Amino acid sequence: MATAGNAALWRELQAVGVAQAQGGWLLTLTLAGMLAAALYALLSLFSWPRLLKPAIVLLLVATAAGAHFMWTYRIVIDSAMATNTLQTDWHEVRALLTPRFAAVVLVGAVLPSWLVWRIRVDHRPWKQQALRNVAGLLAGIAAVAALILLSFQPLASTMRNHTQLRYLMNPLNQLWAVGQSAFGQRKFHGPVAPLGLDARLGAAAKPRLLVLVLGETGRSGNFGINGYQRDTTPELAKARAVSFRNAWACGTSTAASVPCMFSHLGRDGFLARKQDSENLVDVLQHAGLAVLWIDNQPGGCKGVCDRIPSVNTSGLNDPQLCPNGECRDEILLRGLDERLAALPAVQREKGVVLVMHQMGSHGPAYAQRTPPAFKKFLPECTSSHLPDCSSEQLRNAYDNTIAYTDHVLGSTIAWLRQRSDFDGALLYVADHGESLGENNLYLHGLPYAIAPDVQKHVPWVTWLSGGFEQDSGLTMHCLRGQADTRVSHDHLFHSVLGLMQVSTAAYRPDLDAYAACAAP
């Protein structure tokens, strides 16, 4: 476990130049010794009949699985990644169960576990065994402490300058991450703090209809509307939608970003909060608007939509749009008129906000996210083991998902044009970005401080109907002049309130991305 199971750690030490530096080989051996001693100390706690072998087997499986994913996708495993893992669903898991993964688990976990299970273990009477276990624990801790002291200066410098290394110490990183996710993170008990109970709607010539599309795994740089060399967004360009090209996420995973981007606190305030509070969709509902959350992800809305009407389309049985048990994003538009008509009439007449949560460009099985008609860029990567694919194949598969998202957004705009009983608007914002092999990194979810920009730089697209522009005074022409202004998920809460003309003490005009173009 301490040697082969930490191949990703040894590779990273080589990549950052530590292993090649003077004394680097000694530091590498020291780290391996520390890991072995720590695992020995840990297993000493479980050295009891009926506990020792299951504990070893569990650690072997965790080590093999962690080694595979960290080596293959160059991810790290921290508490955020553990939370994402615990919230995943079968469709996402199935995409990761590749033949390579099966081979690693067979060699790294199943065969060693079989050997462990065959070994006879003679345990002492419980008092003697307890003393032996305590002695083993203390010996392991002493060995770790001694190794730290022997190499303190290079070890401290390395860990301070390359913080990602601490998340690669397998399987201890996984145990720490799961513990942090389950017990270390703040748990907020009691009722959710109310927010925006004073929310009121301004006067409007017609009720407004906003479709807020919550994108999944969108890279700003791969949107044609943002200047990408490929025309991945022809329908948005035809609709003359406006894109903020300098938009940034508050997290690198869905579980981290979605609750944060709908909060009024901003990223820093959200991370430092002492109590959970209501969010954007709650305030919109307090203002008297009809609000509906439509989700095409099995993982759901991460608690954001708990207090508003919601539906999940990911498990529908549509033979055209839901092949292999997973629905493509056009399913979000099926029956949309009926869903709108079913909302309470009193609220609907004041205005409507529909939140559509995409499956989007969720990896690693990018090819499964697009129907055949939208595979514009070929050949594409069809493997979930992304390093098997060339950079061109991987980019093609991902860009096809953006082209399909463009079609979904274009179809939504076409639907909004048909709803002459409302002044329509569309806002699309992705939750986070994605690594596509740059610096040999794949997928997303790295700790925010060390994540590359492609995991944090997201698209933010706006379209307004003529009636919306005329009534609000907010013009697409003015927004185009603001396209390079830096915005972030911190702005989403206040920008949507501004679009829907909701006044509340929670609204901050300085964080409204549209305020500079809004009429007084």
Image (cartoon, rainbow, N blue to C red):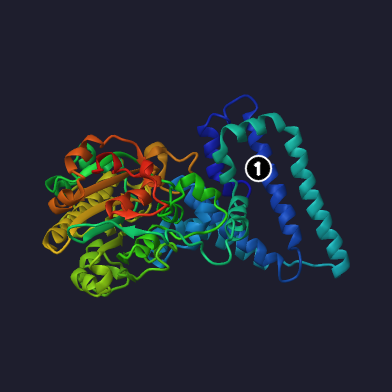
Identified by mark 1, the residue type is Ala
Image spot of residue 410 (x, y percent) = 17, 54
Question: Helix, strand, or loop for circle 1?
Answer: helix
Location of mark 1 (residue)? 32
Please identify the quarter of the rendering in which residue 52 is found: bottom right
Q: From the viewer's side, name the closer residue of 34 and 208.
A: 208
Q: Is residue 86 visible?
A: yes
| Count of numbered circles in the view | 1
Please identify the quarter of the rendering in which residue 219 is found: top left
Image spot of residue 66 (x, y percent) = 53, 53
Left or right of 169? Residue 40 is: right
Looking at the image, residue 508 lies above or below residue 59: above
Q: From the viewer's side, name the closer residue of 194 and 429.
A: 194
Q: Quadrant of the C terminus?
A: top left
Q: From the viewer's side, name the closer residue of 478 and 234.
A: 478
Looking at the image, residue 145 lies above or below residue 259: above
Please identify the quarter of the rendering in which residue 121 is found: bottom right
Image spot of residue 57 (x, y percent) = 62, 63
Q: Is residue 383 visible?
A: no
Task: Assess disc 1: are there few (<14), some (14-19) or many (≥20) residues with their C-alpha within 10 Å of its C-alpha.
Answer: many
Left or right of 359? Residue 123 is: right
Residue visible at 28% across and 66% down?
A: 327
Image spot of residue 460 (x, y percent) = 29, 46
Q: From the viewer's side, name the closer residue of 203 and 252.
A: 203
Left or right of 181? Residue 487 is: left
Residue visible at 15% across and 52% down?
A: 465
